[in-house]
Image (cartoon, helix red, strand yellow):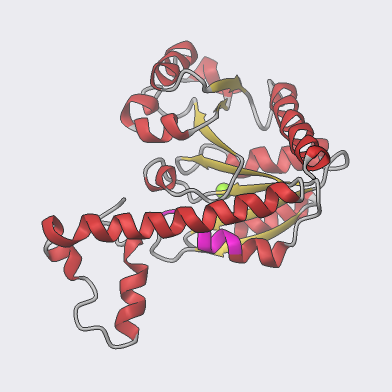
Amino acid sequence: MCRTCGCSDQNHTHDHEHGADHPHDHTLAPGRRTVPLEQRVLERNDRLAADTRHRLRARGVVAVNLMSAPGAGKTSLLERTIRDIGDEVAIAVIEGDQATENDAERIRAAGARAVQINTGAGCHLDAAMVTRALAELDPDAGSIVIIENVGNLVCPALFDLGECARVVVAAVTDGDDKPEKYPHMFRAADVLLVNKIDLLPYVRFDVDRCISRARELNPRLRPIAVSATGGLGLATWYGWLRERVAEAHEVVATTP
Ligand code: MG
């Protein structure tokens, strides 16, 4: 968890507002207090996420946690996905950004319902934020909810949101060594979308190298090369989403 960016300080800030004396003293004595605090925060998060996952499964809702560095094309991918298969399966979106409603407005313009979460100083979504957003979104049974996390390859890897799958997007306009630099994210993911492959003639990015390094970290990772704006590879991405929907419906059908 991030000790320096302050994103895990929300509870302390909250305590401070209610009169606690030293809201940030865990940052002053990291050896004594930081680790237990982080463990408690993550344990509480994981309990809530497990409860959310259970409730979504019971209704056949496929929740996908979509993560990447800023600018890798998450929102463009969602706009295209909604336009291409939104008539076939209901898709709703939870948007996470530090500020603005911009991405939620783009999703609504593409034809799907969206709830925007603004994290302020926070650099990731957590299970409490997503649980509140789900209550507002009230997704249809059997639908897809895509949670677009805050653009960041570090902290989002640590926070279970109650999703059924995690997708990381790496754009060819970034370095192909992202898996080595941010191994926790690539270990946590189920799918690696290598995006913007229509730009490969203009950039130095070795797709095979990126994928092989990611799969060294995580052999079960499913790589899919796409261009969210040009359309290349998207049929494979839609096929993966359809498989998740079929699985979710199967769970509902076979659960007493
Ligand atoms: Mg976005």
Q: Is residue 28 visible?
A: yes
Residue 191 lies left or right of residue 63; in this view the side is left
Number of numbered markers: 0
Extreme residue toward the right, this view: 87
Give x and y (percent) for residue 251. Answer: 75, 38
Query: Against 26, is 203 above or below?
Result: above
Give x and y (percent) for residue 120. Answer: 43, 66
Extreme residue toward the front, this view: 256
For image coordinates 52% across by 63% down, the residue present is 128
108 or 92: nearer the eye?
A: 92
Q: Quadrant of the C terminus?
A: top right
Residue 148 lies left or right of residue 246; in this view the side is left
Q: Quadrant of residue 39?
A: bottom left
Q: Is residue 126 visible?
A: no
For image coordinates 44% across by 18% down, the residue present is 210
Q: Quadrant of residue 37?
A: bottom left
Was residue 129 drawn as part of the magenta stretch in this picture? yes
Magenta residues span 123-131
15 or 103: nearer the eye?
A: 15
Was residue 251 drawn as part of the magenta stretch in this picture? no
For image coordinates 60% across by 20% down, the residue present is 225
Query: Against 212, is 6 above or below?
Result: below
Query: Against 216, is 115 above or below?
Result: below
21 or 237: nearer the eye?
A: 21
Give x and y (percent) for residue 144. Answer: 73, 45
Give x and y (percent) for residue 169. Answer: 53, 33
222 or 225: nearer the eye?
A: 222
